[in-house]
Amino acid sequence: MSASAAKRQKIAGGEQQYELLYHGGIPGRGEFVRLAFEAAGVSYSDPGNAGDDEKKKVYEVCSEDVTSDKDGNPPAFAPPALRIQGAGQNGKSLLIHQTPNILLYLGPKLGLAGTADEHVYYVNQLTLTALDINNEAHDTHHPLAVMKYYEGLSSWHSVYLRHETDKSQIKKMQLWRSRRTSGTTAYRSTYPTLSGCSSTMRPTARASISSAAN
């Protein structure tokens, strides 16, 4: 895909072709999708960060009460999801979710996945590696369970949970830093630039892995 074609991001009526559906106020897994758009210089809408009325769109696509949207797409399990106007059947919208699935779709569309058939899988390897590291780093801050938060608990329970979590968190972080970060740094510094791929692909991929590790 040419750079000019990749930048045709609006359809008839001026509507954004790409609509990223993710929680507002946090980078999270949606940030990997944003990085792809920013690297390609392609604009997109981000309803989760556009006010309460727009934010509703994020949770409508993963509602338990919905079996399909108006264009026949099955619901997303959870954000992030990406709605692509005009990419579905009969010119309808296409709705996909799961970060690596979204990036696998966007790579060739945005000129970030090389030119040979196998290049898209090399790029997908980077995506999956970055997300693995991201998950590991995230879990060092939630060593007991992902949903263990301090807020909303009685004061004594909060103090106890913080004490137990802090002990586990420190131990897990020390192990993770000693065993994973050096290998990650070495790997991201050796990844090649793919022929025909956007010149931003390598630094973007390295930045993705680096930010995941940090």
Image (spheres, helix red, strand yellow):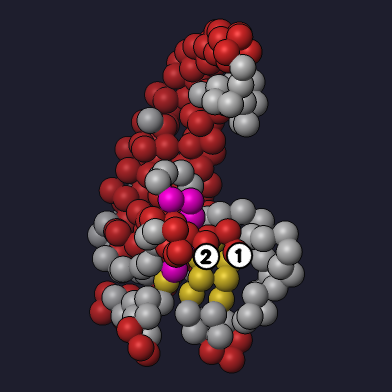
Residue holding disc 1: 61
Do residues under tags 1 and 2 come within 8 Å of each other at their CB atoms? yes
Q: Which quadrant holds the C terminus?
A: top left
| 105 relative position to 209: left or right | right
Q: Does the magenta stretch include residue 112?
A: no
Q: Where is residue 72 in the image (x, y as percent from the top left)?
A: 67, 79
Percent across and percent down for residue 101 are 56, 60
Q: How far, Cα to Cα, is label 1 from label 2? A: 7 Å
Instruction: Look at the image and say whether residue 22 sits in the magenta stretch.
Output: yes
- Depth check, front residue: 176 or 23: 23
Type of amino acid under label 2 = Lys
Residue drawn 26% across the image and 65% down it: 41
Residue 190 quadrant? top left
Against 153, residue 19 (above or below) is below
What's the residue at 57%, 13% (across, down)?
A: 155
Q: Which residue is drawn at 48% across and 47% down?
A: 29
The reply to whether residue 127 is in sight is no
Does residue 120 appear left or right of residue 149 in this picture? left
**At numbered mark 1, what does the secondary structure look like: helix, strand or loop?**
loop
| Tally of marks | 2
Q: Name the residue under label 2.
A: 57
Quarter-of-image position of residue 132 = top right
- Chain part drawn in magenta: 19-24
Give the amino acid type for the residue marked by disc 1 in the picture.
Val
Residue 86 vertical placement versus 113 (above, below): below
Q: Is residue 96 above or below residue 193?
A: below
Percent of width and height locating residue 157: 63, 13
Mark 2 residue crowding within 10 angstroms, few (<14) / some (14–19) / many (20+): some
Front-lying residue, 107 or 186: 107
Q: How crowded is mark 1: few (under 14 residues within 10 Å), some or many (20 or more)?
A: many
